[in-house]
Amino acid sequence: MVHNGYKDAAKSDDPPQWKQHEQEVLEDLKVQNPSGTVGKQVTLVVEGKDAAGKSFRRRIRIDNLQETSPGRYQLTDAKHSSVNDLTKASPEQLRGTFTTNQKTVYDAIGGKDGATVTKVTPVGENASKAGLTPNRPINIEPKVNIGVNAPEGGIVYKGYP
């Protein structure tokens, strides 16, 4: 199985390793934030300008989202590889694991090459489950946390970009 360009060697009767990793990241974030809600698989509509100054509107599904201060949220994406050590990956190498929409959105969140985000709007049922009001814009932190699997076990968080 391939997930975001990386081969997953999980047995067919076991949950894919990347799926297990997503769950481990979720549980780890809950431990780090015991009094808060950690949203799971929240769909976001993100608007902004890319590095060329062209307006964009993209839909992404973020693995996790949690409130860092009233009305401000951190986005966390779980990335797993059974082949490559993502703990040593450069920002550009991590970028290679992103979907097309994630590349545009994550670059803008971090202000990469002058890209900017103007609006982030959670939508759908998982937004409600995360304690958000669907279709009401939110503020986000200026980097995306990427939770990668460490070869020796555990999770390492890397900011992108």
Image (cartoon, rainbow, N blue to C red):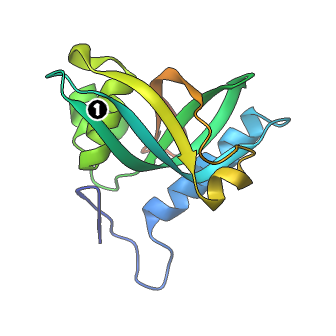
| Residue 160 seen from this side | no
Residue 109, image quadrant:
top left
Q: Residue shown at 39%/49% (left/top)? A: 59
Rendered location of residue 32, percent (x, y): 73, 33
Q: For mark 1, what is the residue?
A: 89
Which of the two residues, 66 or 1, is positioned nearer the viewer here?
66
Q: Residue at x 21, y 42 (%)?
A: 96
x%, y% of residue 69?
A: 72, 20
For residue 103, above or below residue 48: below
Instruction: Categorize mark 1 by other alpha carbons within 10 Å: few (<14), some (14-19), many (20+).
Output: some
| Relative vertical location of residue 56 with respect to residue 123 in this rendering, above or below | above
With 96 as the anchor, is 45 left or right in this view? Answer: right
Res 122 → quadrant: top right
Quarter of the figure with the N terminus: bottom left
**SS category of the residue bearing label 1:** loop
Q: Does residue 13 appear left or right of residue 100 in this picture?
A: right
Q: Is residue 36 visible?
A: yes
Q: Amino acid at mark 1?
A: Ala
Quarter of the picture holding the C terminus: top left
